[in-house]
Image (tube, coloured by chain):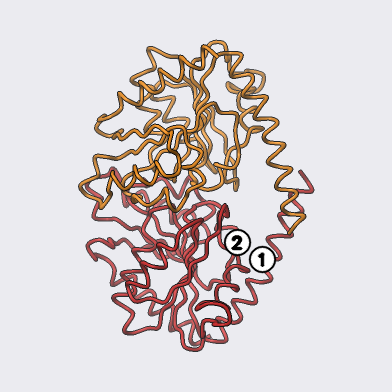
Chain colours: A orange, B red
């Protein structure tokens, strides 16, 4: 068991070294890198589709999509106008910095890297999983956790690690609030207990309600990343 | 990397050895052990609450509850009349056979094991995660994957490993069908492609619709486990 823990620590520290390199590349290019994490089906891809439609004319956006299988999410984003590269992890439960570096270097196929100098925001959409992704930094500047009303308002308490590290918590599917037993007040209180400084945004990708505050958060974070 | 893979294989095979021991204990006692897996918030605990209320007078039920943190789910089940033992995994993304064995041996506190000879069905409610739990057998006889309509009908395609190993797929929250864009036909087709023999049950824990078929499945599986 001690051997297992030592190896796990080495894997995490190898990842951290690569993540720092990536973060340095993003900083040098003035790119805001956002790591999106959530349960399966909370609406990460829907949020990026709406972001592309509403912000695509103003900022230059691209996405790296993590899934065990299929190219579906990258295809959805391309249809919504965002450049996207799919990573298939097989049995892998999270994205790591090495996978993100590889995807950047072959964004449009082998030998065709993503031009970071021509980019404003890079979204790293992680594998849908509220546990493991929190433990592997893929080089991001900001961490966003997307939750959704049908999952229940107690999820921060039951998955504290990922919420604890969030810079922004997006509560999606507010259009389903009346059909569920979700309490926004309880949810906000649980998040505040774990991440007092995190921004909490309530929205519905379906109706568009609340999306403007999300776009404003991205604009402000992008401006700050540009200055650094 | 080769070293990491060798170690992972050893961990899985150690788990398999313990899982076989557990399965032998369940078989000897005629207990049906059911491993419940799903995304966070799909409704595993709600399904067990309703199962307890409707089947608790007929079969002797108990549950082992896996969560990173809190005793909430075990408390919910006890309020619904089911004996339950909570396991907190900290940062752990799945339950393993060693944790289940430990929980059985101290079900009602240290030195107070669960009496398997006085039990019909043991539910092992895994950590909410559609990736990692599929790779660790906790000694179950049957695997149940709980999906829910707000997650979207494409989840089997994107998380194939867990659906591939399912004996039964429960689609919960059918009461939200009209409020979502979920296609039951597409979902069933995706599941059939991965697990042709799996039973697919559509139900709503909220309204009670479809629950009788789930109880019948449990009754039949319990009778089969008793005979073996």
A208 w.r.t. B218: above or below: above
Name the residue located 66 percent from the left edge and 67 percent from the top edge: B16
Expressed as whole percent of the image width and height from the top left, the position of residue B220 reads 40, 79
Expressed as whole percent of the image width and height from the top left, the position of residue A32 reads 51, 20
Residue identified by numbered label 1: B15
Q: Nearer the viewer, residue B158 or B176?
A: B176
At mark 2, the secondary structure is loop
- In this rendering, position of residue A27 left or right of residue A78: right
Q: As drawn, which residue projects farthest toward the right?
A: B3
At mark 1, the secondary structure is helix
Expressed as whole percent of the image width and height from the top left, the position of residue A78 reads 44, 24
B44 w.r.t. B177: above or below: below
Q: Residue A193 appears in which quarter of the rendering?
A: top left
Q: Residues within 10 Å of mark 2 (few under 14, many from 20)?
A: some
Q: Residues within 10 Å of mark 1 (few under 14, many from 20)?
A: many
Q: Residue B96 appears in which quarter of the rendering?
A: bottom right
Residues indicated by labels 1 and 2 sit on the same polypeptide chain: yes
Q: Quick one: quadrant of the N terminus of chain A?
A: bottom right
The mark total stands at: 2
Q: Nearer the viewer, residue B89 or A15?
A: B89
- In this rendering, position of residue A95 left or right of residue A120: right
Q: CA distance from mark 1 to mark 2?
A: 7 Å
Q: Chain of mark 1?
A: B
Q: Chain of mark 2?
A: B
Residue identified by numbered label 2: B136
Q: Are marks 1 and 2 in contact (CB under 8 Å)?
A: yes
- In this rendering, position of residue B137 left or right of residue A77: right
B4 w.r.t. A200: above or below: below
Q: Quick one: quadrant of the C terminus of chain A?
A: top right
Name the residue located 29 percent from the left edge and 76 percent from the top edge: B54
């Amino acid at each position: 068991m001690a051997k297992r823990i030592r190896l796990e620590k080495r894997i995490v520290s190898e990842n951290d070294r690569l993540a720092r390199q990536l973060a340095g590349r993003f900083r040098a290019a003035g790119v805001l890198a956002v790591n999106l994490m959530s349960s399966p089906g909370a609406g990460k891809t829907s949020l990026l589709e709406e972001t592309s439609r509403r912000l695509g004319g103003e900022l230059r956006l691209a996405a790296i999509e993590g899934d065990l299988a299929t190219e579906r999410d990258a295809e959805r984003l391309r249809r919504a106008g965002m450049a996207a590269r799919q990573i298939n992890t097989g049995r892998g439960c999270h994205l790591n910095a090495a996978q993100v570096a590889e995807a950047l270097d072959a964004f449009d196929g082998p030998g065709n890297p993503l031009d970071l100098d021509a980019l404003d925001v890079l979204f790293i959409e992680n594998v849908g999983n509220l546990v493991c992704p929190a433990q592997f930094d893929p080089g991001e500047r900001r961490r966003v956790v997307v939750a959704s009303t049908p999952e229940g308002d107690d999820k921060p308490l039951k998955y504290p690690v990922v919420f604890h590290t969030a810079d922004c918590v997006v509560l999606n599917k507010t259009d389903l609030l009346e059909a569920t037993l979700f309490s926004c007040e309880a949810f906000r209180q649980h998040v505040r207990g774990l991440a007092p400084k995190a921004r909490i945004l309530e929205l519905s990708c379906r109706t568009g309600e609340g999306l403007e505050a999300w776009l404003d958060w991205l604009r402000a974070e992008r401006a700050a990343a540009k200055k650094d």
